[in-house]
Image (cartoon, grey):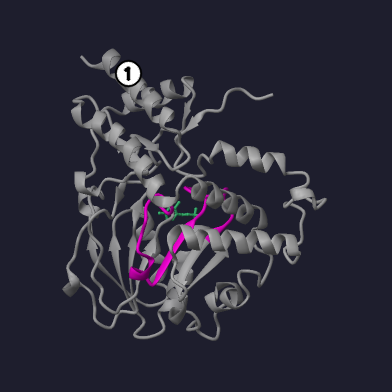
């Protein structure tokens, strides 16, 4: 029926593990003999109840999420969290401090400004977001309700590697949309973690929110019902119809990751893939990556040739070799290879082979 599957380097939606796609395809019409597809099933049925509970349990196992955190499966993408976070968490002084490391953090701060006193405590914008600024503990306002970071910068290719803001008792909020499940994180260091699923977890439609219980229940009385974490937490993400199918596929990805040894094992593979690619970039004089070495992302590898037309020719030529979506984000241009968990190592090898050939053809 179809041509060969491509290596899809898209930043999101992005590749899913083939094994998961095949399992979903096999049970698409009739899920485990229940006579219905998950696409058709009531979210109040016992079959779906098991799907969502298993998904939550497996995510808790994978990320070692402590018992005093709620796991919510919501809609609205990462973007709705830019609003829900200030609406729910600005309940004390009404102040929050943001570190700006790219477009997504900037958008989050801009949205939060509608709801409170937002301070940008550090930003790498003047250097085109090529590094992660690392403010010390004195940078944060003592009475801030939370400190906000974007843990992996999908567009600029940077990541919080060896630095985490020391915020003391102030809850740290992190957007992990493009790196969740690629590494072990100590959830207890965060007040809230969120991630749109369509980068490294599942099809678009579900957003994962992991939130410490004491931060829930402080939304103002006029908070729209869907935007109140307390409502979703009290109903185990079943206050209204959740994105059932996306939750089911996410659950299958969680099972798949567990079977492969969990996040530590996944991280080792992710490191190996990224090191191959950065290793090639570092020895090349033809390609350049603008990101500070210590802040490089394992998931989104950004590079340029220094010539716009060559960048475009590179992207075009890659497509002919069955490597899709290598174009950099429309706001920055250049080339971006998103190599999430589901990108096979052969995809990275294939890309490097092509980079070599392209370099030989076009240098001088
Ligand atoms: C893609 C992305 C978003 C936006 O996600 P939507 O689900 O499209 O709203 C937010 N933050 C990061 C880090 C992203 O990569």
Say which residue appears at 78% left-offset and 46% top-offset.
Answer: 30
Pick the residue in front: 43 or 329: 43
Q: 4 or 65, which lies in front? A: 65
Answer whether residue 178 is visible to the viewer in this image. no
Comparing 274 with 359, the one in front is 274
Is 185 contained in the magenta span?
Answer: yes
State left or right for residue 5 relative to residue 10: right
Q: Relative to 199, is 348 on the left or the right?
A: left
Above or below, 196 relative to 307? below
Secondary structure category for the residue under label 1: helix
Location of residue 256 with respect to 169 vertically, above or below? above
Q: Is mark 1 within 8 Å of ligand 1?
A: no
For residue 76, what is the image quadrant?
bottom right
Quarter in which the C terminus is drawn: top left
Q: Where is residue 142 in the image (x, y as percent from the top left)?
A: 24, 81
User: Can you give x and y, in whole percent of width and height, for residue 262 in the image?
Assistant: 45, 51
Q: What stretch is highlighted in magenta?
A: 178-207
Q: Quadrant of ligand 1?
A: bottom left
Q: Residue at 48% of width from left, 60% of height from top? A: 61
Assign the magenta stretch its main secondary structure.
loop
Residue at image point 17% right, 68% down: 136
Residue with the most extreme right position = 35
Whether the magenta-drawn stretch holds residue 319 is answered as no
Q: Residue at x 40, y 49 (%)?
A: 182
Q: Name the residue under label 1.
A: 358
């Amino acid at each position: 029926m179809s041509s060969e599957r491509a290596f899809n380097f898209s930043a999101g939606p992005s590749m899913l593990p083939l094994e998961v796609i095949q399992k979903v395809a096999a049970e698409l019409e009739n899920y485990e003999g229940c006579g219905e597809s998950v696409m058709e099933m009531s979210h109040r049925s016992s079959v779906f109840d098991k799907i969502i509970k298993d998904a939550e349990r497996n995510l808790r196992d994978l990320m070692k999420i402590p018992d005093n955190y709620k796991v919510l499966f919501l809609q609205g993408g990462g973007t709705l969290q830019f609003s829900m976070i200030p609406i729910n968490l600005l309940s004390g002084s009404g102040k929050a401090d943001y570190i700006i490391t790219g477009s997504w953090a900037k958008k989050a701060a801009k949205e939060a400004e509608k709801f409170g006193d937002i301070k940008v405590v550090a930003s790498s914008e003047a250097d085109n977001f090529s590094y992660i600024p690392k403010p010390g503990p004195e940078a944060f306002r003592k009475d801030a309700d939370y400190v906000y970071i974007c843990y992996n910068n999908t567009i600029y290719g940077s990541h919080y590697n060896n630095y985490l803001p020391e915020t003391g008792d102030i809850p740290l909020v992190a957007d992990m949309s493009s790196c969740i499940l690629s590494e072990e994180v100590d959830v207890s260091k965060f007040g809230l973690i969120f991630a749109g699923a369509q980068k490294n977890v599942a099809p678009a439609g579900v957003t994962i929110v992991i939130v410490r219980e004491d931060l829930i229940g402080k939304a103002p009385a006029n908070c729209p019902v869907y935007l109140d974490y307390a409502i979703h937490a009290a109903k185990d993400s079943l206050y209204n119809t959740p994105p059932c199918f996306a939750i089911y596929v996410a659950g299958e990805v969680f099972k798949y990751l567990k079977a492969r040894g969990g996040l530590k094992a996944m991280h080792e593979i992710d490191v190996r893939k990224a090191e191959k690619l950065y290793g090639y970039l570092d020895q090349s004089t033809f390609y350049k990556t603008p990101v500070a070495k210590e802040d490089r992302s394992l998931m989104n590898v950004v590079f340029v040739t220094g010539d716009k037309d060559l960048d475009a020719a590179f992207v075009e030529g890659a497509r002919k070799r069955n490597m899709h979506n290598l174009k950099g984000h429309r706001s920055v241009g250049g080339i971006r290879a998103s190599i999430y968990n589901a990108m096979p190592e052969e995809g990275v090898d294939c890309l490097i082979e092509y980079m070599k050939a392209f370099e030989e053809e076009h240098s001088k």
